[in-house]
Image (cartoon, coloured by chain):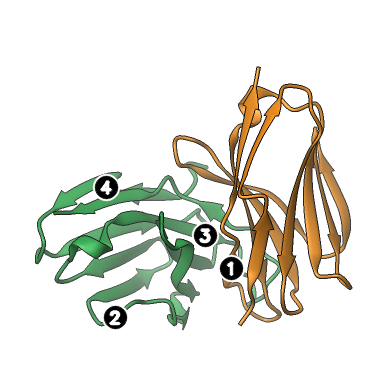
Amino acid sequence: DAGVIQSPRHEVTEMGQEVTLRCKPISGHNSLFWYRQTMMRGLELLIYFNNNVPIDDSGMPEDRFSAKMPNASFSTLKIQPSEPRDSAVYFCASSLGLIVSSYNEQFFGPGTRLTVL
Amino acid sequence: KNEVEQSPQNLTAQEGEFITINCSYSVGISALHWLQQHPGGGIVSLFMLSSGKKKHGRLIATINIQEKHSSLHITASHPRDSAVYICAATEFGNEKLTFGTGTRLTIIP
C-alpha cells in the first residue's frame, strides 16, 4: 500500500487566496484526520471523519476553514481566504476506524507545508 | 479537557546511552500513543498502548494507568534515533488525539 497520500507537498500563496489541500487515505481505512502543526501550538486536530461523516470538528479554527470527504478515498481541506497565520504543516492521517473507537493506530501522510505571504 | 505533558523538552545524549522520555496526562484515557517525527517532518506511529508494556527492537513503552503516566525508553541509543518524540492520548469512545509538546532527542556519535 502507498500509505496516506497528500498533495501538494508544498504550497506558497498570497494572503486572501483560496488554498485546497488534498488527502487520499489508506485503502480500507474508515477514519480520516486533518492535523495542523506549528512551532507555537505543536500538533493539533482540526477535524476527523468516520465513514465520510464529520465526527469532531471542534478544532477547526474559524469559518475560513472547511473540510469535506465526498467518498472513502478522498478528502479536502480548504482555507478561504488564507491569512499569514495559517502558515503551518498540515497532516492527514487515517485509521481502520471500524467503529468509532479510540483504540486505532493512526497512519500519517507526509504533510503539506503551507506558506501564506 | 485532557492535558498531555512531556519531559524533557530537549535531550542530548551520547551514543549508547539509555534514554527515557516521560509523558503524563490529566484525565483517564483509553490509549496512549508514541509517535516519532523525523527531521524531514514525517510522523510515524511507534506504539499504541492501554496497559503494561510494549517492546519493539530497542524501544520500550510503558504505561501506568493509576498514575496517568507513560514512558518511552530507548536502549543502546544511536544517532539515527535523533528525532522528535511525541506522546498523544485518546479518550474513551473518541479517536481524537491530544498531543504533548514533544521531546527533541539528539544522539551524539
Give me the chain that's orange.
B
> Which residue matches tag 4?
A8
Which disc is residue B97 wearing? 1
Mark 2 or mark 3, earlier in chain: 2
Q: Position of residue A84 (x, y in %)?
A: 19, 61
Give the camera-side residue of B29 and A49. Answer: B29
Work out how far the residue at label 2 is from the one at label 1, CA to CA, in angstroms.
20 Å
Please determine if labels 4 and 3 lie on a single subunit: yes
Give the residue displayed 37% in from the left and 77% down from the top: A60
Q: Chain of mark 2?
A: A
Give me the chain that's green.
A
Work out how far the residue at label 2 is from the one at label 3, CA to CA, in angstroms.
23 Å
Q: Which amino acid does the dot numbered 1 rest on?
A: Leu
> Which residue matches tag 2?
A62
Mark 4 or mark 3, earlier in chain: 4
* Element type at mark 3: strand
Q: Position of residue B4 (x, y in %)?
A: 65, 67
Work out how far the residue at label 4 is from the one at label 3, CA to CA, in angstroms.
18 Å
For label 4, the crowd category at 10 Å Cα-Cα, with few meaning under 14, some 14 to 19 and many 20 or more, is some
Q: Which amino acid does the dot numbered 3 rest on?
A: Ser
